[in-house]
Image: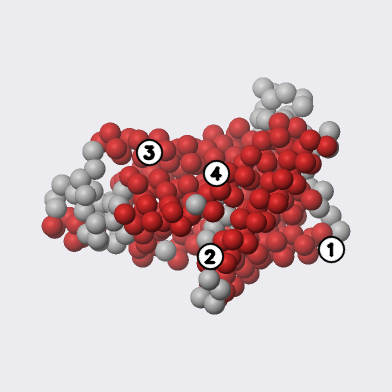
Amino acid sequence: MGIAALLAVTVAGVVAGAINTIIGSGSLVTYPVMVLLGVPPISANVANTVGLAPGAVAGAYSYRTFMHEGDSAAAVSAPSAFTLSRGRIGGLSLCAAGGALIGAGLLLRVSASTFTLIVPFLIALATVLVACQPRLARMVSAHDDGSGALPVSSARLGVLALLVVCGAVYGGFFSAAQGIIFLAILGVFLPGSIHTHNALKNLLQAIVNVVAALFFIVVAIAVAAGAQDPTLSVTSPLSGTLDTRTWIAAACVAVGSLIGSPLGAWIGVRIPARVLRISVVIFGACMAVLMAVRACTIP
């Protein structure tokens, strides 16, 4: 990658970091830009996951104070009520980590041609989720009783855990819009305020990104050391995918996103989220069409 391409990826990272801070789904910017600059699709996806991991951790940390919002009051007013205890948070975190490993593993076992065909549909799905985000947010608010106290059955918690695993599998495979997916799931199945849901969403999203990123790094080290898994076929995308170009692109995205995250906080209070959301939806729709055309025309 030349200097101009590296600069373009870094700028895309800045934009993605800002978008993630305001509405999420910054991957709709970074992934297509890297692919259009010549980075192989799976390499671009890996670079995107690794590069956005630091920003995800920072976002989770900044929302940590909302994680146990209302727990004490709920425990006093309704001893049988559901609260976000450390045990329950830990359980959902383990579900997210397990799902991320499955998704990341699936990514490295599909062929490059198959992934190229799947991506347009994933981008289209992410774009639809961004467009529907206000409706999802209203749905989340509708389940908020203001007290954070609501009896939750074991069956409901089991379904929640299963859906978190599914969302994490998606996030480990292709990270765009995973935050919106998590927020919708948590809003439907858990009581509490939107701030509590958003805090837990940020935590789960950070876990998915970090676990998937670590998985990709470990695999890259193993491949570089000549310890490639013999069960993988010779046509596995591992061959030539996790190369130096991937990590350079990831570094550019990381630097850009760390710059863009605080910039997004500044922009967010000056530009209506609706305007930015419409812009992202239009861009995402164009990228879905462009990736589809590319998948059909490039062997």
- Distance (Cα) linking label 4 and label 1: 29 Å
Reply above or below: 270 against 76: below
Amino acid beneath label 3: Ala
- Distance (Cα) linking label 4 and label 2: 25 Å
Measuring from the top left, give residue 2's x and y in whole percent: 86, 59
Mark 2 vs mark 1: which is more N-terminal? 1
Q: Are marks 2 and 1 in contact (CB under 8 Å)?
A: no
Measuring from the top left, give residue 185's x and y in whole percent: 40, 45
Residue on which disc 1 sits: 4
Mark 4 vs mark 1: which is more N-terminal? 1
Judged by depth in the image, the label closer to the viewer, 2 or 1, is 2
Q: Is residue 215 among the parts visible in the rendering? A: no
- Distance (Cα) linking label 1 and label 3: 44 Å
Q: Secondary structure at mark 1?
A: helix
Residue on which disc 3 sits: 161
Answer with the quarter of the image where residue 131 lies. Answer: bottom right
Measuring from the top left, give residue 59's x and y in whole percent: 49, 62
Indicate left or right for 30 with 208 as reference. right
Reply above or below: 109 against 263: above
Q: Secondary structure at mark 4?
A: helix
Q: Secondary structure at mark 3?
A: helix
Q: Are marks 2 and 3 in contact (CB under 8 Å)?
A: no
Reply above or below: 83 against 122: below
Q: Secondary structure at mark 2?
A: helix
